Amino acid sequence: MEYKTKSLLEELNHVLDNSEKVIINPRREYTITKSIDRGEAIKTEHGCVATWSPDNSTGRSPADTYIVDSLEVHNTIDWKSKSNKPLSSDTFCRLYDNALEILSTKKEIYVTNRAIGADEGYALQVDTISSSPLVSLFTYNMFRDIPDGIEDSVFNGEFKIIVLPYDKIDSNKYPGLLNNNSSMVIATDFTKRVGIVIGSSYLGTVKKLAFTAMNFYLPHHNILPLHCSANVDDKGNVSIFLGLSGTGKTTLSTEPTRKLLGDDEHGWSDNGVYNFENGCYVKTLNLTEEREPEIYRALFEEKNHLKNGAILENTMVYPNGRVDLSDERLSVNGRASYPLNVLENAQSASKAGHPRTILFLTADACGVLPPISKLEIDQAKLWFLMGYTSKIPGTESGITEPIATFSRFFGEPFMPSRPSIYMKLLGDKMEKYNTNVYLLNTGWIGGVYGKGGERISLKYTRAMVRAANEGLLENVEFERENYFDLSIPKNCPGVPSQILNPVKSWEDKGAYEKEARKLADKFASHFKNDFGTHPIDKKIIAFCPGL
């Protein structure tokens, strides 16, 4: 793929050369001090800094997020996905000029030169240009130092992101071209390797824009990008965890006996698995030291704020600096950003070999999926494509009862290419490296959420993860389940055998069958609606429940 940036970069360099004060790679302490002095953040009693966003900016804004539809990318992007909103090159250039005009009015401009990717051969340099010192601090937390040897990377150049979090776009100047009910825009041109953020002060917008770019570029180099956490044991056995919010991805991958490669974004290349990030960006609502001791200590071990730099975002902090993580009045999507190196069990190299085990996590509120089941290659492609879990009350505003939700590849908004590209890479690598894939239900058993079902014990879930990671399920006897065609182990060390097959934990077997059929029908309906016109192999379709 050819990347074109020259003319746009010349315009940007002209603005930077003529601006009053451009600060390139400011010291971390400087970004903290400036963020506080400018009122973008305050100090907490523990030393991290806290910030807040307007109501329209406490999470991603899909309605304002666009991808440039150019000749070079048109046949690669899946324009059928609701997450991929096309934008013309002409409109992007107008937005770019608008962004430069805004930048030129700033007294200070902050530039950080960072990288995404712990494997220098597949690392992308990301230059972030912003009016906000807090954004610079965030890039220090989340993006990596530029590694030696990046000049030999497959990317051969950098990706630029212009971030103007507190400014607004006049959408009336773009009639019919942008969301005219909004003053926010997030636009990416993969061909020119430029991203623009105007009006979004949600820090995750910057992270996800950069990683969406990686998820688009890497398959061109035979690398499977994965929205996952990953860890490795002392023998080099790698395990990766894919799952949507609320499924336990962070909890299960933070394991004292294993080293954490990363929390959220990885690539699987011919060299093995490598972390994209430098840090973690985790949800904070109801975070406790008891449940998440490593994460809690990373945020709240008392230290001077200039030596800390962890960021709390949209969490309840009182004027005296006291933090209340149980209070959701500001947002149910409160977040924390901190560098990986503050975790005691982080793997410093952030890369390892090929995964022995992949775990697809789902928090099934219907109570009908097995706690653990083993997937065949084509079956794994199907569950990878579907990305199923349940949203339950408390996970998002407005959710009052469980809702089945599907997000392709466990990260639909950030996986822009055609589904067949990611599925093929998964299957090829599973086969080549003899990787086992398991579906792990961290949700409910014995009944539906709120109607007699109970969430499976974390103790048992950890035991199943341990068994999968150590190869203890590779030679046990399996039985086939009727509604989802899943292979269930008849026994698993440390787990009562009666809970392994979901129907056995339901007192009312007829109610179980009714709920199982309902969920299978939802799978079929979603597949038909979202992928019915995609050229998907019949062997994969055959594994879709309900079809």
Image: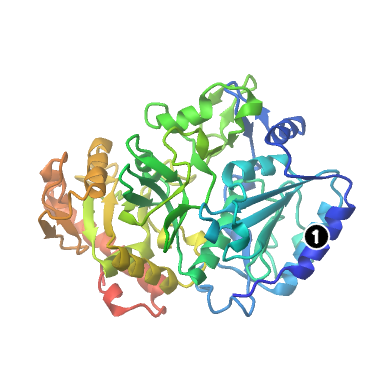
Residue drawn at x 54%, y 79% is 75
In this picture, residue 349 sits left or right of residue 539: right
Q: Is residue 531 above or below residue 392?
A: below
Q: Is residue 212 above or below residue 362?
A: below
In this picture, residue 457 sits left or right of residue 285: left
Q: Is residue 402 above or below residue 33?
A: below
Residue located beneath label 1 in the image: 12
Residue 94: where, in percent of width, then height?
78, 67
- Depth check: give the residue in front, 111 or 185: 111
* Extreme residue toward the top, this view: 320
Residue 287: where, in percent of width, then height?
44, 32
- The quarter of the picture where residue 170 lies is bottom right
- The quarter of the picture where residue 178 lies is bottom right
- Depth check: give the residue in front, 1 or 531: 1
* Residue 403 appears in the picture as rendered: no
Residue 242: where, in percent of width, then height?
38, 53
In this picture, residue 398 sits left or right of residue 367: right
Residue 371: where, in percent of width, then height?
22, 48
Q: Quadrant of the C terminus?
A: bottom left
Residue drawn at x 32%, y 63% is 383
